[in-house]
Amino acid sequence: MNKSYIQLLFLTLLVVCSSCNDEWKEEQFEHYISFKAPLESEGVANIYVRYKDGQKTTFMQPLEVSGSTTNDKNLSVKVGVDADTLGVLNYERFQTRTDFYYKQLSTDYFAIPSAVDIKSGENTGLMAIDFTLKGIDMTEKWVLPLTILDDPGAKYKVNPRKHYKKALLRINPFNNYSGTYSGTALKVVMEGHENETPIVKSQIKSYVVDENTIFFYAGNIDEERKDRKNYQVFATFNDKGGVSFHSTNPNMKFVVKKDASYTVSEQMDAVRPYLLHRYITINNVDYEFTDYTLVSTTAIKFKVSGSLILERQLNTQIPDEDQAIEW
């Protein structure tokens, strides 16, 4: 190898190394603004909001600045409600089953700021959404559709990908007793067929009515039924350990056969010592109802008996209740 070739190779390596030495300091991507609201299997982002009668509850929705370097500008990001995306989602997922459609949350139940500030030196800003959910009808599937608005005079760039530019927040109010109960110990039988194998649902979802009341659908009825509103069973919990069941639909011919009660027990996780397991057990569930719409020509009477168990897992290291509960 001659001397001139060695010198040329050395100079080439010197140029390459000097050109890439500070590459990591430069921005590798765009500083786009995005919502942090990942979609789940239902096509929306579930959020959980503590129900309070006549009081507001604030949910903090994050916005993020993407990129490989820290945001170096004070940004005021404009946000708004986006009904169009919700309409497209409903049709694409449910077609003509309009009873399955997500409904846009009424402005009576929420308030949002017109802009969210993200400070220089920070890559995250929090959008405070105030919810006042008294009287909300949870037989409907409520969604708050949000979007980041383009602003030609602003210093920010909106993420061009729709799943980052928009947030479809499905609203799930909760109280101390709401959630998905295990229904494996609850039997549903048709009158006259008590000795046959009962109907058992592995999960029974409950919904908030007020701070001490939930509802679920009678028997084996769930969100799949078009006429589900006709079959709500309300359960009110008192501070003495009692649970009272009732229905507001006389056509159900709802009858309670026993006085129900509930217990609350807690246990720390054996593997994760910061995790608290809280169990709510509803005992002596025993009622009858008539399904008068399943078969147009015949009313069918059902008997329901057994117990329900709700497990709620709480991370005791997290102070915010909605974030501490592992939904």
Image (tube, helix red, strand yellow):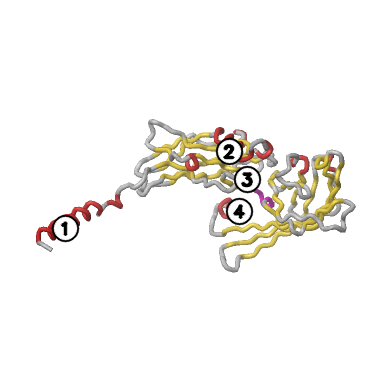
* N-term-proximal mark, 1 vs 2: 1
What amino acid does circle 3 point to?
Asn
Residue 145 among magenta residues: no
Q: Nearer the viewer, residue 122 or 37?
A: 37
Q: Position of residue 98 (x, y in %)?
A: 67, 36
CB contact under 8 Å: marks 1 and 4: no
Secondary structure at badge 1 equals helix
Tag 3 near tag 2, CB within 8 Å? no
| Alpha-carbon span between mark 1 and mark 4 | 61 Å
Q: Gap in Å between the C-alphas at discs 4 and 2?
A: 24 Å
Disc 4 marks a residue whose amino acid type is Trp
Q: Which residue is mark 4?
A: 327
Q: Residues within 10 Å of mark 3 (few under 14, many from 20)?
A: some
* Residue found at x 57% / y 35%: 88
Q: Going from the N terminus, do you reach mark 1 or mark 3 first?
A: 1
Residue 245, compared with residue 95, is above or below; it is below
Q: Does the residue at mark 3 contact the one at mark 4 (Cβ under 8 Å)?
A: yes
Observer-nearest residue: 180 or 238? 180
Q: Whole-Å distance between the Cαs marked 3 and 4?
A: 11 Å
Query: Residue 214 appears at what percent x and percent y?
Result: 72, 47
Q: Residues within 10 Å of mark 1 (few under 14, many from 20)?
A: few
The residues colored magenta run 174-178
Residue type at the position of mark 1: Leu
Kindly tell me whether residue 135 is visible in this rendering.
no
Q: Which mark is residue 172?
A: 3
Q: Which residue is mark 2?
A: 89
Helix, strand or loop for disc 2? helix
- Of the numbered discs 3 and 2, the one sitting upstream in the chain is 2
Residue under pointer 1:
9
Vertical relation: 94 (above or below) 69:
above
